Amino acid sequence: MRFVRCGASVAVGVLLTAAPLEAQSSLTRPYSSWVVTPHGITVPSGNTEQFSAVGMGDGAVEWTTTGGTMTATGVFIAGPTPGTYAVTATTAAGSMSVAVTVTARTASTPRSPVPVTINPGDNIQAAVQANPLGTTFLIRRGIHRRQSIVRPKDGMSFVGEAGAILDGEHAAGQAFDLYQTRNVVVRGLRITRYAPPNLNSALEGAGSDGALIEGNEIDHNANGESRAYGLSIGSASIIRRNIIHHNGWLGINGYRAVDTLIEGNDVYANPPAYFNDTVGEAANVKLFDCGRITIRGNHVHDGIFRGIWVDTMRPDVTIEHNRVVNHGRAGIWYEVSYRGVIRNNYVENAGYHQTRLPDWLRGGGIEVSNSPDVSVLNNTVVNSLNGIIGLQAQSYRDGPYGKSQLRNLLVQGNTILMPSGQTGITENVGSAEVFTSWNNRFVGNRFELLNNPNPFAWMGQQLDERQWQAYGQGTNDLFAR
C-alpha cells in the first residue's frame, strides 16, 4: 500500500501499515528522552533531597545510590563521606543515573528537617495540628484507616513508604482537602475507597496553589450517584506520575485552575462502568474554566466515556505527547474553549460507544467544538468512529475572550487511519461561514482510507479525496487505499 497525492501519478514511498503504527506504539514511553531530576546537585552530609523520574514508563521506580541512602519514594539521604555518587532510577523500561555530590557538614550548614513518622493507627490530622509549617510527614507502610487531612499547613509534605495506604473504607469522605493551602506535597501514597461528597475528590486540590502531587495511586473512590472524583487540581501545581483509576465520575478534575502541569500519569477506567450521564461530565480527565494548562505525556485509556476533555477553557491549553486509547466517546475533546494546541498525541479506538450520524460528526479521535485559534498538529488517529473533526454547534454562549466560534482551526501534519468515518467539519447553525469565512483549514495530512468511499465532511456533504480538495482543503495531503 502506498501514499499518493490526490491527482498525482507518482507514488510516495511511505507505508502507513506497519512502520508508522509500530513507531507510535512506542508512546507507551511518551517522551523522547528520560529525565531524572534534579541532577548535578550538591547535598551536605546528613541532608536529604527528593529525586523524581519522568518518562520511564508507567511502572514502579526502584531507586538506588552508590553512596548514602535512598528511600522507596526517591528521597536521597546524604551519607557521612564526601564525594560524588550516582543516583539511579530503574523501571521495567530501563535505568538512568544522575550525579550527586556530598559535601562535609559545617557548623553553619542548615539541616534538612527530620520527618515526623506516622504509623498505622496514628491520627495524621492531629500531627498536622501539632507541627509547624513545612513539616515533612513520613507515612509508614501499612493501612491508615479513615484518615482525612484537612487544610494542612503551607509547605507540608506527606511522603509514603512503599505500601503506605490511606483507606477510606467507603466511609471517610476525603483523604486530603488542600483548599487555600500553598506548596503542599503528596507523594507515594495509595488513596483508595474514599466516598467524596458531591463535586469533590478523594484528593481535593481545588483552591490550592503550588501543590506537588506525585507518584500516588488514587483508585476506587466513589459515592453512589454523587459526582465524586479521584483528584482535583489546583493552580501552579504539578500532577505527575500518578496512577488514577476506577473512580466515580472523573479520574482528574479541574475547575478554575491555572498554570498547572499534568504529566506522565496513567489514567484509566474513570468511571469504571457505563451509566446514564445526564449531566454530561464523565471522563478520564475533564477540566473546566482552567487556563495555561499543559497535559503532557499521559497514558489515558479504557474509559467508557471520554478521554481528555477540556471545556470552557481560558487561552493557552497544550495537550501533547499523550497516548489516548479505547474510549466510548471522543478521545480528545476541545470544547467551547480558546487558543490552544493539540500535538503529537496518539489516539486509537475513540467513539466505540456511539453510532455514526448522516448529518453530524461525533466520536472523533480529536474533536474541536466552537473554539477559535486551535492548532491540531502531528497527531496519529487510528480506527476511531471519526477522525479529526471540527464542529460549529448551536446553543453555546460567547465567553470572556471572544465569540465561541470555530475560527482559525489548523489541522496539519497528522496521520489518520480511517477505514470508515470522516474527517472534516459540520455545523448545525444554518450558516456556511465556518467553511467559507473563518479560516479553517486541513493541510498536509496523511490518510489511510482503505475502502472508505467518502471520508471527508465539508459544506454539509460527504466527499471523496478529489471533492475534498476541490473545496480548497487537503493541500499537500497524502492518501492511501
Image: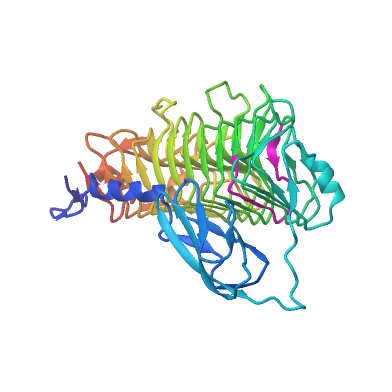
Residue extending farthest right = 130
Question: Colour scheme used in the picture?
Answer: rainbow
Q: Which residues are magenta?
A: 199-217
In percent of width and height, residue 261 lies at 59, 54
Q: How many marks?
A: 0
Q: Does residue 196 appear anywhere in the picture?
A: yes
- Residue at x 17%, y 55% (from the top left corner): 13
For this rendering, which residue is in front, 471 or 379? 379
- Residue at x 82%, y 57% (from the top left corner): 133
Image quadrant of residue 219? top right
Q: Is residue 203 magenta?
A: yes
Residue extending farthest front = 80
In percent of width and height, residue 153 lies at 81, 52
For this rendering, which residue is in front, 442 or 145? 145
For this rendering, which residue is in front, 372 or 394? 372
In percent of width and height, residue 406 lies at 51, 47
Left or right of residue 25: residue 135: right
- Residue at x 63%, y 70% (from the top left corner): 80
Vertical placement of 26 versus 83: above or below? above
In percent of width and height, residue 371 lies at 54, 47
Residue extending farthest left = 9
Vertical placement of 259 versus 207: above or below? below
Q: Quadrant of the N terminus?
A: top left
Q: Does residue 439 appear anywhere in the picture?
A: no
Left or right of residue 298: residue 180: right
For this rendering, which residue is in front, 87 or 413? 87
Q: Is residue 260 magenta?
A: no
Vertical placement of 340 versus 142: above or below? below
- Residue at x 77%, y 56% (from the top left corner): 135
Q: Quadrant of the C terminus?
A: top left
